[in-house]
Amino acid sequence: MSRATIHNPDNDAHFMRIKPVRAAVRVGRGSTLLAESRNALWVLENGRDVYDPVIYIPEADITGRLEPVAGKSTHCPLKGDASYFTLNGEEVAWTYDRPFEWSQQLRGHVAFDAGKVTIEVTGTDALL
């Protein structure tokens, strides 16, 4: 029997679930539209705490000019290695461009820092 959740191989209490967002998602900053998608993913994660859900947008649906942050990478034992993006010099987004085998759904998706952008979810899945 397989589980729908993805667990950290070294800590079973650290886990996540990846689900499709069944709604329209728009990401903006001020008057600038950064992304618009009907193919986004929710990532719900439990680690040191229960984290707020994060929406990952397919790279093809990114409309804003994000610049890669040179030399910055972080590691997550659930997702893999992440790279970061800036908008007008401020770090606002990241991607798991080197995900683990079990997190491949996140490849080619970008997440935005909800404290630095506006994320609107409208439609049937607007609330989890």
Image: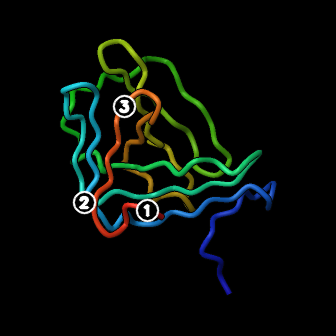
- The Cα–Cα distance between marks 3 and 2, rounded to whole angstroms, is 18 Å
Q: Which mark is residue 38?
A: 2
Total count of labels: 3
Quote the CA–CA distance across marks 3 and 1: 18 Å
Mark 2 crowd level (few <14, some 14–19, many ≥20, 10 Å Cα): some
- From the top left corner, tell me how far across and down residue 69 is, in percent: 41, 20
Q: Position of residue 64 (x, y in %)?
A: 21, 31
* Position of residue 76 in the picture relative to residue 92 (left or right): right
Instruction: Name the residue that disc number 3 marks.
Output: 117
In the displayed structure, 73 sits above or below 62; it is above
Task: Name the residue type under label 2.
Answer: Arg
- For numbered disc 1, what is the local secondary structure? loop
The N terminus sits in image quarter: bottom right
The percent coordinates of residue 121 (x first, y second) are 33, 53
Compared to 120, does 128 lie above or below?
below
Q: Earlier in the sequence, mark 3 or mark 1?
A: 3
Question: Which numbered mark, 3 or 2, is in the foreground of this view?
Answer: 3
Crowdedness of circle 1 by 10 Å Cα count: few (<14), some, many (20+)? few
Residue furthest top in the image:
89
Displayed quadrant of residue 12? bottom right
Q: Secondary structure at mark 2?
A: loop
Comparing marks 1 and 2, which lies closer to the viewer? Answer: 1
Quadrant of the image occupied by residue 101: bottom right
Name which of mark 1 and mark 2 comes first in the sequence: 2
Helix, strand or loop at mark 3: loop
Residue in the image at 41% along x and 37% along y: 112
